[in-house]
Amino acid sequence: MSVLRILGKASSINVRKVLWTCDEIGIRYEREDWGIGFASTKTPEFLAKNARGLVPVIENEDGILWESNTICRYLAGKYGRTDLLPTDPWSRALVERWMDWQATELNTSWRYAFLALARRIQGYDDPALIAASAGDWNANMIILDRHLSSAGPYAAGEAFTLADIVIGLSVNRWLQTPIERPDLSAVSAYLDRLRERPTYIGHGTNDVA
């Protein structure tokens, strides 16, 4: 079996999903720096692998794959890690529900505020849009807090799964971005649990992209 090749800079939240998943499973990999500040993802070489020009991309004996949450699902399935992604349809749906929520509702809410306040991207400077994005972001975190309070301690219930990798990185991003935040005790306790995992170290806190 060939060594997994991961294309993407380690500071990217989506690349870190894949790196954390690899460390949970124990997969050997080689990572190459691609993205802002490193090799361009707009070159013909990279676009031939992912026409969207985004990281991460993985390559192995099966082929080329992109889209971070999909990659995490694929790796858990390939290596038989049913603890991270169950095969039982109902249990799997509980995990994928929160993975999909992270990729759609949560990501969408934070985008403007994060690009404006953390990355300081030119053109993201409208105070009203920043406030609206931060408000939506906090509203989604309140949803997560209520869920964890009633159905935790992890996103999909009693056990750590792929959902906690993608949600955990998102919680860290929320805490690292300079916005006003409500005090959410269940979310705080949840992140403390994730920080106890050795695999969290190196992937959980370097949130700059």
Image (spheres, rainbow, N blue to C red):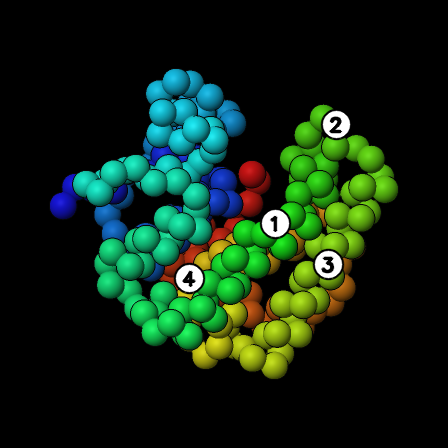
Residue 139 in the image, given as x and y percentages of width and height:
73, 61
Q: Which residue is mark 3?
A: 138
User: Mark 1 belongs to which amino acid?
Assistant: Asn
Element at label 2: loop
- Report, in whole angstroms, how far the alpha carbon at label 3 lies from the one at label 1: 12 Å
User: Mark 2 belongs to which amino acid?
Assistant: Gly
Q: Residue at x 37, y 37 (%)?
A: 57
Q: Which residue is mark 2?
A: 123
Which badge, 4 or 2, comes first in the chain's sequence? 2
Q: Which residue is mark 1?
A: 107
Within 10 angstroms of label 2, few (less than 14), some, or many (20 or more) residues?
few
Numbered circle sitting on residue 162: 4
Q: Is residue 164 visible?
A: no
Q: Residue at x 51, y 64 (%)?
A: 97
Looking at the image, which residue sits at the far left? Answer: 1
Q: Is residue 139 visible?
A: yes
Within 10 angstroms of label 3, few (less than 14), some, or many (20 or more) residues?
many
Pick the quarter of the image with the N terminus. top left
